[in-house]
């Protein structure tokens, strides 16, 4: 399983910025990532292992500066763990396949799920759907 790979494996496959977010639980600055204001149709995959994490139809504008989703693509593709850093209690979200840090989930989402998966753009890659009639 990908969680067992060492830092050298990940450093060879990720940019330094991606490594910092995915493997060191870093956070990109708000309103700076590729996807905070992107609403193209498609699926968001883990930049570490390619696992499908979120569908674009679950994405919403939260105003927080990071991509926000109200549900994972399929139950179990995102794992949760307690994060008590920075003097507060939060729930960290990671890719269940490779353990890559994605961001945090909060119980303040505006949809029926009540959830806001707040995700770093550097931890995901959008695989956009091709437009009809496209090549």
Image (cartoon, rainbow, N blue to C red):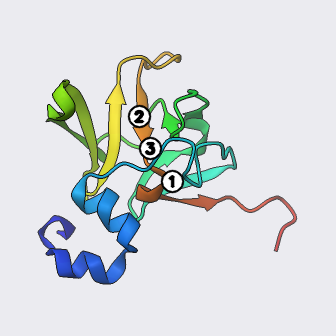
Q: Do the residues labelled 1 and 3 touch (CB within 8 Å)?
A: yes
**Distance in Å between CA atoms under marks 3 and 2:** 12 Å
Residue 44 circle label: 1
Residue 64 circle label: none
* Secondary structure state at the residue bearing disc 2: strand
Q: How many labels does the image show?
A: 3
Task: Read off the residue under disc 3.
Answer: 73
**Distance in Å between CA atoms under marks 1 and 3:** 9 Å
Residue 97 lies in quadrant = bottom left
Q: The C terminus is located in which quarter? A: bottom right
Q: The N terminus is located in which quarter? A: bottom left
Residue 105 lies in quadrant = top left
| Position of residue 14 measured from the top left corner of the image (x, y, whole percent) | 37, 74
Q: In this view, does 98 lie to the left or right of 128?
A: left
Q: Do the residues labelled 3 and 2 touch (CB within 8 Å)?
A: no
Q: Do the residues labelled 2 and 1 touch (CB within 8 Å)?
A: no
**Residue at position x 68%, y 49% from top?**
41
Task: Read off the residue under disc 2.
Answer: 117
How many C-alpha atoms fall within 10 Å of the one at disc 2: few (<14), some, or many (≥20)?
many
Q: Which of marks 2 and 1 is in front?
A: 2
| Position of residue 15 measured from the top left corner of the image (x, y, whole percent) | 40, 74
Q: Is residue 55 left or right of residue 105?
A: right
Q: Nearer the viewer, mark 3 or mark 2?
A: 2
* Secondary structure state at the residue bearing disc 3: loop
| Residue sitting nearer the eye, 40 or 131 | 40
- The answer to which of marks 2 and 1 sits earlier in the sequence is 1
Query: Height in image: 11 above or below 99?
Result: below
- The answer to which of marks 1 and 3 sits earlier in the sequence is 1
Query: Height in image: 129 above or below 27?
Result: below
């Amino acid at each position: 399983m990908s969680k067992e790979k060492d830092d050298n494996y990940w450093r060879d496959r990720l940019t330094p910025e991606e490594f910092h977010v995915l493997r060191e639980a870093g956070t990109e600055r708000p309103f700076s990532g590729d996807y905070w204001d992107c609403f193209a149709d498609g699926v968001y995959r883990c930049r570490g292992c390619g696992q499908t994490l979120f569908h674009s139809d679950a994405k919403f504008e939260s105003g927080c500066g990071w991509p926000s989703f109200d549900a994972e693509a399929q139950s179990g593709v995102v794992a949760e763990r307690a994060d008590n850093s920075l003097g507060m209690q939060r729930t960290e979200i990671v890719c269940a396949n490779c353990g890559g840090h994605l961001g945090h989930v909060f119980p303040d989402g505006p949809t029926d799920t009540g959830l806001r998966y707040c995700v770093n753009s550097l931890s995901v890659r959008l695989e956009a759907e091709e437009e009809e009639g496209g090549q």
